């Protein structure tokens, strides 16, 4: 069998040497892209390669999702590294960075090494793991190889896992160290005091914690709770000179704060997610358990899409966070927060944004921001992480389509008109005609700042 693969007749986006949507070809040799070009490849290239005709479909770099929760270890009844990375690759996500709120939380060098070991040979996508900032964080950082550590995750607001910030003296030391070494600090920015006050008021209105409906979730975890904490995070970045990345931006007000602070805080960046960008505009949308996440979906916020296009928001990530259906039942203060989204995120984004923008925000920008070596664009020498999406008849996403243990999706009932046809991970054809066709081919991501 030929070791080379030649993809022909593709509209290529995310290739620095070609104009977007240039119809051309890509030659894969082993794990890497050997060459790309416009038009038809030379006959000599075709002689000893497996040919895949893209038939005019769009080819883009494999997506890099820098914010997922794959639930391993300790929460594997919801999913694990193998099942969730498989769903991600089916959705065109070929690399990911996983969050620390597992059980135990990834706050020690030992827990970090355990995750790396668990992913090796089992992950369908390329992998990296964030270290959670907690008590003892500097001891952990000292023991983790610098090129394995993508960033530090700092929870300024509580979420699933209840990870607390390190003591004040350790936090100061960590922030100074991260600023010096240019290690990104990723922040979950929600104000606990505002959330607690809003929750208490809701309990008083409804009579008990159990009686507060899901429809109150976006009022409890309010715009003010997000904006207040984001301002504090920006002040922290200004004080320490941090490379600060604000996760899952959900409000127009936060986007405005970031736009205002950009010039004086050059290391400030932000992400948003398809859960906030691809919102059903019906009034009852925020009342469903399917979209109960932290920070809360506040409804349709068109300013987020504008901020994505004008560069205020740098990256798209999914915040994929599976729970079983029964764990999602209950009210605003009792049902689990979080939703799975890796399998359908790209399809939903393609209903709102161009492939060129998606490739820029979910491949090139994440690779640049986190210093991911040789990924994020279609270029000779880079790893051959490639996704081909093609237009198809309009179809409706349903829970039955889900290829992961949680067996439901927040996008149930939503219509899309694209599908992920092919995916290569490190040069291995992993998805063919929309189905998994290869073994787990993921490798550890290398971070070079």
Image (cartoon, rainbow, N blue to C red):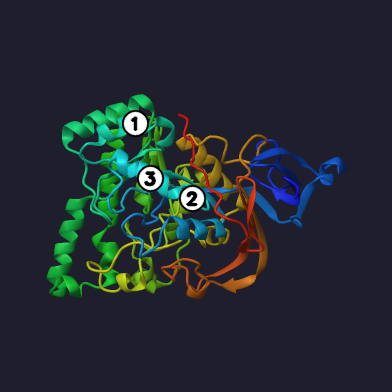
Which residue is at the front of the view, 51 or 230?
A: 51
Q: Secondary structure at mark 2?
A: helix
Q: Position of residue 136 (x, y in %)?
A: 22, 36
Is residue 2 visible in this depiction of the protein?
Answer: yes
For the residue carrying disc 3, how many other residues have a C-alpha within 10 Å: few (<14), some (14-19), or many (20+)? some
User: Which quarter of the figure is the C terminus placed in?
Assistant: top left
**Between marks 3 and 1 in the image, the one whose residue lies nearer the viewer:** 1
Which residue is at the front of the view, 307 or 177?
A: 177
Residue at image location 81% in from the left, 45% down from the top: 48
Q: Position of residue 91 (x, y in %)?
A: 55, 59
Q: Secondary structure at mark 3?
A: helix
Query: Of marks 2 and 3, which one's residue comes earlier in the chain?
Result: 3
Please name the residue that numbered disc 3 is placed on.
256
Q: Is residue 345 above or below residue 409?
A: above
Which residue is at the front of the view, 398 or 310?
A: 398
Is residue 241 visible in this depiction of the protein?
Answer: no
Q: Is residue 436 left or right of residue 160?
A: right
Q: Position of residue 54 (x, y in %)?
A: 74, 55
Please name the residue that numbered disc 2 is placed on.
306
Please name the residue that numbered disc 1 is placed on.
242
């Amino acid at each position: 069998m030929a070791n080379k693969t030649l993809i022909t007749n593709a509209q290529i986006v995310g290739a620095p040497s070609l104009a977007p949507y240039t119809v051309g070809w890509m030659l894969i040799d082993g794990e890497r892209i050997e060459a790309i070009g416009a038009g038809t490849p030379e006959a000599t290239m075709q002689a000893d390669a497996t040919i895949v005709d893209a038939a005019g479909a769009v080819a883009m770099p494999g997506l890099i999702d820098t914010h997922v929760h794959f639930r391993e270890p300790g929460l594997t009844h919801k999913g694990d590294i193998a099942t969730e990375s498989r769903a991600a690759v089916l959705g065109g996500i070929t690399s990911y960075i996983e969050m620390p709120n597992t059980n135990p939380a990834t706050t020690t060098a030992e827990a970090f090494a355990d995750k790396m070991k668990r992913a090796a040979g089992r992950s369908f996508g390329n992998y990296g793991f964030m270290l959670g900032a907690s008590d003892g964080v500097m001891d952990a950082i000292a023991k983790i190889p610098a090129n394995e550590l993508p960033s530090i995750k700092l929870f300024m607001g509580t979420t699933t896992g209840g990870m607390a910030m390190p003591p004040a003296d350790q936090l100061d030391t960590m922030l100074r160290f991260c600023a010096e070494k240019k290690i990104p600090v990723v922040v979950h920015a929600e104000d606990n005091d505002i959330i607690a006050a809003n929750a208490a008021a809701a309990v008083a209105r409804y009579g008990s914690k159990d009686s507060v409906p899901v429809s109150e979730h976006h009022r409890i975890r309010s715009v003010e709770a997000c904006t207040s904490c984001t301002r504090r995070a920006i002040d922290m970045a200004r004080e320490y000179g941090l490379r600060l990345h604000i996760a899952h931006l959900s409000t127009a007000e936060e986007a405005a704060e970031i736009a205002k602070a950009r010039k004086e805080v050059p290391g400030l960046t932000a992400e948003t997610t398809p859960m906030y960008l691809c919102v059903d505009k019906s009034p009852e949308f925020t009342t469903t358990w399917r979209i109960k996440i932290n920070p809360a979906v506040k409804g349709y916020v068109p300013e987020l899409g504008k901020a994505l296009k004008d560069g205020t928001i740098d990256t798209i990530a999914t915040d994929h966070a599976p729970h079983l259906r029964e764990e999602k039942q209950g009210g605003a203060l009792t049902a689990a927060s979080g939703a799975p989204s890796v399998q359908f995120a790209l399809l939903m984004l393609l209903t709102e944004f161009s492939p060129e923008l998606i490739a820029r925000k979910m491949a090139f920008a994440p690779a640049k921001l986190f210093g991911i070596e040789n990924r994020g664009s279609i270029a000779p020498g880079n790893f051959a992480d490639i996704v081909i999406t093609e237009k198809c008849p309009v179809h409706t996403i349903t829970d039955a389509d889900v290829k992961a243990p949680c067996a439901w999706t927040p996008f149930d009932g939503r219509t899309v008109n694209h599908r992920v046809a092919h995916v290569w991970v490190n040069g291995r054809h992993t998805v063919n005609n929309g189905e998994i066709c290869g073994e787990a081919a993921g490798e550890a991501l290398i971070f070079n700042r």
